[in-house]
Amino acid sequence: MNNPTTGEHSNIAAIPYPPDLYRFDTTAEGISGSFAAVTEADIEYFHQYGYLVINDAFSATEVSDALAGMTHLMDGKCPDFRAIQFEPSLAKAKDEMTDEERRDAIRKIFKYVSHEPRLNAIATHPGLLDVLARIMADTPQLFQDMALVKPPRHGSEKPWHQDCAYFNVPQETTVVGVWVALDEATPENGCMHVIPGSHDEGPMIHFNRRDWQICDTDVPVGRDTMVPLKPGGCLFWHGLTHHGSPANQSEQRRRALQLHYKPASSGEVTTQERMAVYGSEGKDVDC
């Protein structure tokens, strides 16, 4: 097994962030029994800690169908679909790649629910929507859909951040992210990491460094909890929960769906209003 903090492998480049920015000694616990097993105590756990893990949210058939739908879009089988983003280090060579190589050069596809019914079925799953409604005490409204791919050896880090720093929603809005593992997500291939309870500590200033992110020195890394998942496992997290994922330091794919929901009754703010909270301008701070 490769060391996820050093990337010791003959074909893997050194990671471009501090090796102690992610810890690998604390693992989140999840519940089993799919969505039907979620109790009121589990909903309260989400509100207390800012995340909830369901180990077996989706069946093997649903995972297989979702992977087939993702591959269909990645291989260009839907002529109207163009929302594909490649890993920066691999993008220049994409036109010379085979289909298999091209799939392992893609970092992200997005806005797919209106193009691929097998992926839409995940986003509109009745059990998923029921848990979201219980968390929000409102009707959940999907407003962002992505499929995230950390290609073997090349999948880059997503630095620590809060999702609400990206979205023009009022601060009090209960935004919920949903992350569905389609491959096994492991410490080595870049599983998600969360900071439990950080959603209750308010918005953080974000900076344009490796990405739009919380400054590395402002992350309470001592509370870092990693969330490895089997295929079909699901992570819910609050829009203010600090989270990120290290680089893929393995030979294994890490494909996943990421969905964001907000309460149907929620309002909007302007980009300027959001940046007044999450941006650094005028605050006399630096990273």
Image (spheres, rainbow, N blue to C red):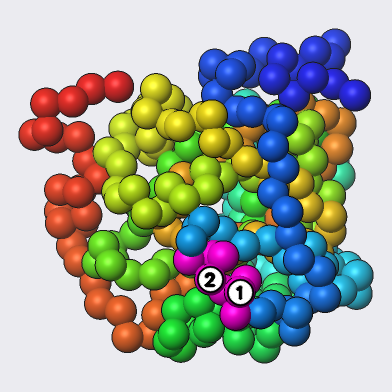
Density class for disc 1 (Cα within 10 Å; few <14, some 14-19, many ≥20) is few
CA gap between label 2 and label 1 equals 5 Å
At label 2, which amino acid type do we have? Glu
- Dot 1: element: helix
Magenta stretch in the rendered image: 40-47
At label 1, which amino acid type do we have? Ala
99 relative to 266, above or below: above
Q: Is residue 86 visible?
A: no
At horizontal 39% and vertical 70% (from top left) the residue drawn is 174
Residue 44 is tagged as 2
Q: In screen coordinates, is 274 left or right of 98?
A: left
| Place of residue 26 in the rendered image (x, y in percent of width and height, measured from the top left) | 69, 37
- Dot 2: element: helix
Q: Are marks 2 and 1 in contact (CB under 8 Å)?
A: yes
Q: Residue tagged by mark 1?
A: 41
Instruction: Give the farthest residue toward the front.
Output: 41
Q: Main secondary structure of the magenta part?
A: helix
70 relative to 122, above or below: above
Residue 43 on the magenta segment: yes
| Place of residue 201 in the rendered image (x, y in percent of width and height, measured from the top left) | 34, 48
At horizontal 48% and vertical 37% (from top left) the residue drawn is 160
Say which quadrant the N terminus sits in: top right
At horizontal 47% and vertical 50% (from top left) the residue drawn is 197
| Place of residue 51 in the rendered image (x, y in percent of width and height, measured from the top left) | 56, 59
Q: Is residue 172 visible?
A: yes
| Place of residue 52 in the rendered image (x, y in percent of width and height, measured from the top left) | 62, 62
